[in-house]
Image: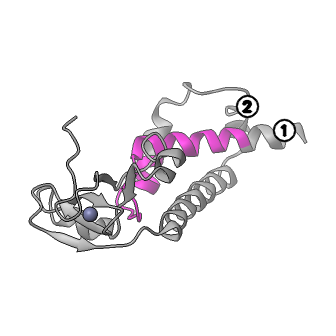
């Protein structure tokens, strides 16, 4: 990985801007340590293309910069923004898991009992096609990771129900 540059205005060490979910990248701890900044207006930024996307943030001046520093945008660190995006994704996973479980018959539900992790080859793909592709989130998501999260949620819910 390339060395992270310093702010051209105040010489503070810049943080990378992350537009990406899930948590492997957006560790809570790193976020608190200001090692990255939550990319605002993700969709609009993405449409600008990689070269014009904001890449670095200065927590000292609240400026965000493109890689070549030709574009500067002032934006503040906002805890609510990340929490809202996370909550939206969390609610989405919950909603899809419930929808899927409600559409299953008893035999299908049984196939999710125990730890069925890799028995459902096509299922992740089905979840991605049906619910995730083409959907816009306020953060960039990894469709593969998200389909796993939904799968795990379904397994968890079906197994909890069984124990009641
Ligand atoms: Zn600065």
Cβ–Cβ under 8 Å for marks 2 and 1: yes
Of the image marks 2 and 1, the number of the one nearer the N terminus: 2
Comparing 126 with 18, the one in front is: 18
Instruction: Please report the residue visible at 67 percent of the width from the left and 38 percent of the height from the top.
Output: 155
Q: Circle 1 sits on which residue? A: 162
Q: Where residue 65 sits: x, y (%)? A: 20, 63
Residue 119 versus residue 147 in the image, above or below: above
Which label belongs to residue 113? 2
Find out whether residue 17 is within the magenta segment: no
Q: Please name the colour scheme applied to the rendered image.
A: one colour
Query: Would you say 35 lies left or right of 69 here?
Result: right
> Which of the 4 quarters of the picture holds residue 19?
bottom left
Find out whether residue 142 is within the magenta segment: yes
Element carrying mark 1: helix
Instruction: Please report the residue visible at 84 percent of the width from the left and 38 percent of the height from the top.
Output: 162
Binning the other alpha carbons within 10 Å of mark 1 as few (below 14), some (14 to 19) or many (20 upward) gives: few
Q: Where residue 146 sits: x, y (%)? A: 48, 46
Count of numbered badges drawn on the protein: 2
Marks 2/1: CA–CA distance: 8 Å
| Start-end of magenta stretch | 127-156
Comparing 143 with 109, the one in front is: 143
Quadrant of the snapshot with the C terminus: top right
Residue reaching furthest to the right? 164
> Which of the 4 quarters of the picture holds residue 106?
top right
Quadrant of the snapshot with the N terminus: top left
């Amino acid at each position: 990985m390339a060395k992270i540059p310093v702010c051209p205005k105040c010489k503070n060490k810049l943080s990378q801007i992350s537009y990406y979910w899930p948590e492997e990248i957006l560790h809570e701890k790193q976020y608190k340590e200001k090692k990255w900044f939550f990319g605002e207006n993700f969709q609009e930024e993405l449409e600008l293309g990689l070269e014009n996307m904001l890449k670095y943030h200065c927590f000292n001046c609240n400026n965000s910069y493109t890689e070549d520093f030709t574009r500067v945008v002032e934006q503040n660190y906002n805890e609510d923004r990340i929490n809202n995006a996370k909550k939206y994704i969390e609610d989405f996973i919950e909603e899809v898991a419930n929808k899927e479980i409600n559409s299953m018959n008893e035999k299908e539900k049984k196939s999710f009992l125990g730890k069925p992790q890799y028995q459902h080859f096509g299922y992740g793909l089905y979840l991605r096609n049906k619910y995730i592709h083409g959907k816009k989130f306020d953060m960039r998501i990894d469709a593969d990771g998200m389909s796993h999260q939904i799968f795990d949620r379904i397994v968890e819910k079906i197994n909890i129900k069984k124990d009641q």
